[in-house]
Image (tube, coloured by chain):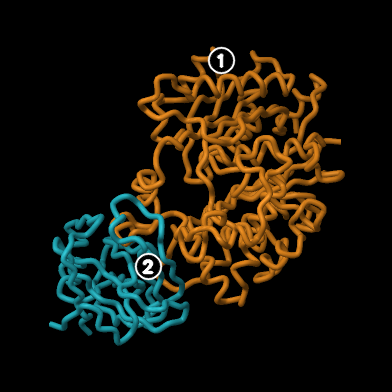
Chain colours: A cyan, B orange
Amino acid sequence: MTMPLVKLSHSRRYPPRATEFTRVFWDALAEGRFLVTRCRGCQRHSFPPKPICPHCWTDVIDWEEITTEGRIYSWTRVHAGPAIFEEDLPYAIGIVDLDCGIRVACPFIGDAAWQCGMAVEMVSVIYADGPFFGARQKGGSHNSYMV
Amino acid sequence: MSCRPVIIGCSALPVGRHQTPSNAEVHVVEHELLARLVVEAMADSGAERERVGAIVVAQPRPYTRQQYFSTFMTSYLRIPCDGIVMEVLGNGLTGALAFDKALDEVALGRTEVALALGINMETAISARDHMMESMRKTGDVDFHAPAGFTPISWYALDMQRYMFEYGVSRSEVASVAVKNRGHAAHNPLAQFRKPITLEEVLAQRSIVEPLGLYEVPPRGDGAACVVIASEQYARRRGLSYVIIRSRAFHHEGVHQIGDVPADMIGFTAAATAAAAGFEAAGLGPDAVDLAELYAPCTIVEVLASEAAGFFPKGLGAHAAATGMTSLGGKIPIGTSGGLTSRGHPSYATPLYSVVELFDQLRGRAGPRQVDSARIGFLMNELGNYNAALVHVLEAAK
């Protein structure tokens, strides 16, 4: 179930903070695995991962690796962005509905002719300072290598 | 109904560029602008100054140098209060929350007269620097902001999806900008008043695809003050007023994006709050004479007009393109010029919408007056941020 790793030479423009809890997600992401939290009581998934189930408020939570293929729900290309993203302009971002029933918002990797409904796959983008998740056209090979 | 709150007066600054850069020799400062508006609004209302017992201020942007603005303004104008003196903040709802909380203070009987006011100064800060702050307001700051989402990028996502689901063209949605500019031409408070064509709208540089410069909100500075009183007080003093016929609020418990697939463009919170507001008012969308919607982008106005029940899903853009939301149309929306042309001094924007409806329902909107306007629909909603606050206003007989 591992995702393709896409390597980029620069650092993340706005690095996420890892907590004692979410570092499990980020560490797995760096290895190409996409984890979400799942409540042991109600069995419902959560993403972004949470130490408390938003549905039943218990803290008995398991990590579960999910499959990472899906379709674009919507997308846009940002031409005017925050100062810190200036070198990336214009850049594509969007929302992916994964086949496993999880919705993710993320950067879109590569220069595809993005369209709602297009088949995509999640990738782990390995920046100089750490990972972030993105989506690319299914079967794409933009600057990636498999481990 | 002795404590039923009514609107009795208002004043607002023309939206535009008022903020001076930090190195200016002579500055425009926020409290001088706002103090004048308070005095004007009170004069407009005919209320007595000593009856003001509550002041609710929309929290200014962080670029406003003076802080603790509510107690500061209370001191600046020497208004002792027994109700409340406070600042409120709630994303784009901020100005609407000031209005709503001022209504509450009167409804609870804590004061006979309350002020809702706000000032939004930001144009001396560049868009790229402003977005360094606003990007932290989209989704989860650790799981979404690193992707480069900006507030209006979410509306671009709505636009792409709307075009995809309903087969609507960009130009039909973009017609909202042309309509709004036509309205703004008649509003002295509007930031942009020169009429534009659809071709010009479509030819602007792209900001967040497929939305171009004229389809997203301009940046602007503005300030407004609204005076609220109990109906009993207004009657006793013989003041003209506008009634709050109903109020409703909804938040689905989802901030921008849930973790399972859902309809993003149904604006469920807005639809729920609008339906509740209509039910409480005892009337339906057909009874509305005009509407002011918090709609930063053209697509937001379309989606909000559908969620409010003015048009079926997927037909809002067509309605705008065929003049149904223009002055003289079935349901005029944004007679002020809307956020795209009246302007969008964000935290004060909802107060401008109150000002527009107050002027319209008082019959003093000049060349943009809606004939015999009696029911005004005010909806401040946050799109994918999901909160929606509705007030149905009515002209007093």
What residue appears at the point 63 percent right and 62 percent down from the top-left corner?
Answer: B199
| Left or right of B354 on screen, residue B373 | right
Above/below status of B106 relative to B126: above
- Mark 1 falls within which chain? B
| Left or right of B142 on screen, residue B226 | right
Q: Quadrant of residue B113?
A: top right
Q: Which residue is mark 1?
A: B79
| Left or right of B196 on screen, residue A73 | left
Please indicate, yes or no, whether residue B143 appears anywhere in the rendered image. Answer: no
What residue appears at the point 62 percent right and 55 percent down from the top-left corner?
Answer: B273
Rendered image: mark on residue A92: 2
In this view, the mark in front (2 or 1): 2
What residue appears at the point 71 percent right and 52 percent down from the top-left corner?
Answer: B333
Q: Quadrant of residue B52?
A: top right
Q: Are the two marked residues, 2 and 1, in contact with CB atoms closer than 8 angstroms?
A: no
At label 2, the amino acid type is Ala
Q: Quadrant of residue B44?
A: top right
Q: Nearer the viewer, residue B357 or B19?
A: B19
Q: If the image is split into quadrants, where does the N terminus of chain A sit? A: bottom left
Q: If the image is split into quadrants, where does the C terminus of chain A sit? A: bottom left
x, y (%) of residue B65? 39, 26
